[in-house]
Image (tube, grey):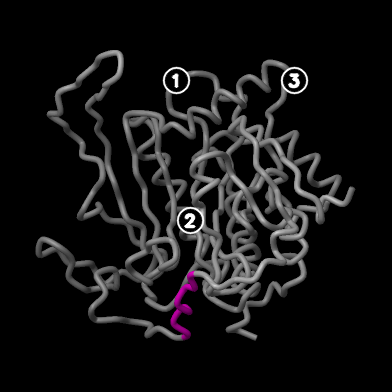
């Protein structure tokens, strides 16, 4: 049977869970919620933007007149270095104190540039900051989550391209599950799960979107979001701070390729949430880990129609409407030259 026509399930080995694939549902008419189109043009500088160079922020703070990627402590952090919270524990109710740090990364001084529109050299500065943040915070915290929410569809409140860093004294739930599954696979196979998986993808080549000497973007076999992508290194490495200079340079190049394809798919500034997963900083072995980045974009049919994770997805299990192979084919088919720059 053609997997592009018939409903079936696919297993996600990273989270040890199943995804329902229902490609025939793309034929249904859509009369539901539509998103606002992204602004076609933004100024290079916005005097009201609290992320632009030289502008004021909360608490009478002011940004320096920065000219490259800039990091500052989040003015409204979700985690604090010290907590006086009193733990509570019983058979059914448990709580515990936690501590950490939150930072904001302004990718560029330009208000109007997303990472997809930045040059490879400019993206290299972002990569360098990611690596340095992991190197600085990793020794002090069990987990360093580097991520980006892009676009109003993903709840981003400011269009100035930026990401965040949340460092915590605990390992989050999803990361803990990935640690368990990768460890179990390594104990069975004596090789990292995601390295073996990428080798398989490069042979089959039906879900690979783009690649270079060090990295590959794939729509994973078990993808949940319509145009979800997984960014994997060709040579296994456990953490961002362990990347070589060559891997860092190639990372900037592959990000430019993959994110440009996103924007070109519907000729819009493609919204997504992305984040890095690497080995926790728990002092244990990390040979079972492969550093990777998840990209979760919500758009399904156009720049205004997105996938909603509701009903069955919230109450039963994840479900998608197009196959990962179809998504990868559509992303491969678009140009690597950004539609705004042609």
Residue underneath mark 3:
189
Residue 323, image quadrant: bottom right
Closer mark to the observer between disc 1 and disc 3:
3
Give the x, y percent position of residue 209.
73, 58
Furthest residue in direction top, as rendered: 91
Residue displayed at 43% across by 28% down: 281
Horizontal and vertical percent position of residue 69: 39, 63
Q: Earlier in the sequence, mark 2 or mark 1?
A: 2
- Tell me which secondary structure the magenta stretch mostly adopts: loop
Q: Nearer the viewer, residue 147 or 238?
A: 147
Query: Which residue is tagged 2?
Result: 273
| Residue 289 painted magenta | no
Q: Position of residue 208 (x, y in %)?
A: 76, 54
What are the residue bounds of the magenta stretch?
33-40
Q: Which residue, given by chain and number where applicable, does mark 1 sit on?
A: 283
Residue 20 visible in rendering: yes
Q: Are marks 1 and 3 in contact (CB under 8 Å)?
A: no
């Amino acid at each position: 049977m053609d997997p592009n026509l018939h409903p079936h399930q696919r297993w996600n080995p990273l989270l040890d869970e199943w995804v329902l694939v229902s490609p025939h549902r793309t034929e249904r008419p859509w009369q539901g919620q539509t998103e606002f189109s992204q602004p076609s043009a933004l100024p290079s500088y916005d005097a009201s933007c609290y992320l632009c160079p030289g502008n004021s922020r909360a608490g009478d703070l002011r940004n320096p007149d920065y000219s490259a990627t800039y990091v500052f402590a989040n003015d409204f952090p979700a985690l604090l270095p010290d907590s006086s919270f009193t733990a509570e524990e019983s058979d059914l109710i448990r709580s515990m104190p936690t501590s950490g740090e939150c930072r904001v990364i302004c990718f560029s001084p330009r208000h109007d540039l997303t990472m997809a529109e930045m040059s490879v050299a400019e993206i290299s500065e972002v990569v360098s900051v990611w690596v340095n943040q992991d190197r600085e915070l990793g020794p002090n915290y069990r987990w360093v989550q580097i991520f980006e929410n892009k676009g109003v569809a993903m709840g981003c409140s400011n269009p100035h391209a930026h990401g965040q860093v949340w460092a915590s004294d605990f390992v989050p739930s999803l990361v803990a599950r990935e640690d368990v599954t990768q460890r179990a696979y390594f104990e069975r196979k004596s090789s990292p799960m995601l390295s073996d998986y990428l080798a398989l993808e490069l042979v089959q080549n039906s879900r690979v979107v783009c690649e270079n000497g060090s990295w590959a973007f794939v729509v994973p076999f078990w993808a949940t979001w319509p145009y979800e992508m997984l960014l994997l290194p060709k040579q296994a490495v456990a953490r961002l701070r362990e990347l070589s200079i060559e891997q860092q340079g190639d990372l900037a190049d592959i990000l430019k390729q993959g994110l440009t394809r996103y924007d070109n798919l519907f000729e819009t500034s493609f919204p997504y949430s992305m984040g890095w997963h690497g080995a926790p900083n728990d002092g244990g072995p990390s040979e079972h880990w492969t550093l990777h980045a998840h990209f979760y974009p919500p758009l399904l049919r156009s720049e205004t129609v997105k996938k909603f994770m509701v009903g069955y997805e919230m109450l039963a299990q994840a479900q998608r409407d197009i196959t990962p192979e179809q998504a990868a084919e559509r992303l491969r088919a678009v140009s690597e030259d950004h539609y705004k720059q042609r």
